Image (cartoon, helix red, strand yellow):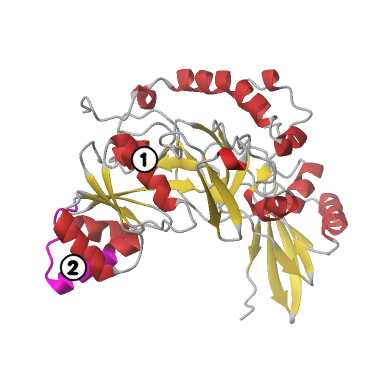
Amino acid sequence: MTRPGDYYDELETRPPERREAALFAALPAQLRRARQATGFARILADVDPDAVGDRKALARLPVTRKSRLIELQKAAPPFAGLNATAPGELGRIFVSPGPIFDPEGRRADYWRLARALYAAGFRRGDILHNCFAYHLTPAGSMLEMGAHALGCAVVPAGPGNTEQQVQAIVGLRPQGYVGTPSFLKIILDKAAELGADVSSLKRALVSAEALPASLRAELKGRGVATLQCYASADLGLIAYESPALEGMIVDEGIILEIVRPGTGDPVPEGEVGEVVVTTFNEDYPLVRFATGDLSAIMPGASPCGRTNARIKGWMGRADQTTKVKGMFVHPAQIAEALRRHPQVKKARLIVDRVNENDAMTLRCELQAADAALAQAIGETIHALCKLRGKIEFVPPGSLPNDGKVIEDVRNLS
């Protein structure tokens, strides 16, 4: 049973059809804003913003891939022309590994992390011990801005200096922790070693690495209820857990799609694919931004009462590019082969070693073997990849639902 104050705002519990209508009513203006940026002016040159009124229309727009950001930013520094706000008018500019340059605007809760913190139990007046990095990368700032929007005080601890962290927690008695789950365990272990009382820590919001069920249980057993969120330096908050612990709820400030890796084509609900996000960020209006992360939409709504779609969380990387006989093979090439042969709805390229030579086998889901089709698909693969491979038909539904288009099983060690 829910109580007043269980939700950050009324947006979280609105009927799904009302949410969908509001997002797509706001999208044309966002597309016009994006087209003011030189990069998106080129990418969206043939797009009529007013014609993009639903998911089907959105799915026809080009995808911009995070995997290309480094080269795009080098060609048009600093933000590849994807920014609608001039660099000098931003609040901060971060440098993520790559390097990739990430803008931060001057609005309160720019990254929208307050919603995830609220779901994790943080409230006005709490002290939050922030162990995300503040140096160059944005994670520390992301959580701090969200905490300030909630009315929390922040200890800007950053990572490392474990004994000093313990001393700070003993002295300041923060109610909660944000950072990676592994570093929270390190702090708790150090506190136990020192005989220090860090029992003020009752809740945590973690991110940036996996949270195994065993570690979550251990943290809970040590008095810290731990939830996680999924965010990125380009997009801010994407999804977050609630106390129901049944999937991650999509943030209210984005449109999320799951597409077949290597394409922009949405997959059916439940099928694993690449996470693609369209934001309503005025400074950095990313449209159909492919994160490179795999996930899947879960059926139904969360038992906690929040009505937005849920995803299964991070399930791996979508960029499965590999090298075969010195040639790169990309998921997009396999997707193009399937487009040319629509009889095949799903396929997986297996890359292996046979007699000390690289070998490819394309496993295609089809009701019955077809020699002529196998030959045609083989010719298509050769034309696209400049490599020959074996075509193998398997029963529909037999390929794993894990988002893999290319599976490299070679032992190259």
Tell me which segment is drawn in magenta.
185-201
Report whether residue 155 is seen: yes
- Judging by the rendered image, the residue that carries numbered circle 2 is 191
Q: Residue 145: x, y in percent?
A: 38, 41
Q: Is residue 320 left or right of residue 108?
A: right
Q: Earlier in the sequence, mark 2 or mark 1?
A: 1
Of 185 and 299, the residue lying toward us: 185
Please give the label number shown on residue 159. Answer: none
Does the magenta run of residues contain 386?
no
Of 357 and 192, the residue lying toward us: 192
- Quadrant of the frame with the C terminus: bottom right
Q: Is residue 412 left or right of residue 161?
A: right
Q: Residue at x 69, y 67 (%)?
A: 351
* Tag 2: amino acid: Ala
Q: Is residue 189 left or right of residue 374?
A: left
Does the magenta run of residues contain 193?
yes
- Judging by the rendered image, the residue that carries numbered circle 1 is 146
Q: Residue 253: x, y in percent?
A: 48, 31
Q: Is residue 79 above or below residue 381?
A: above
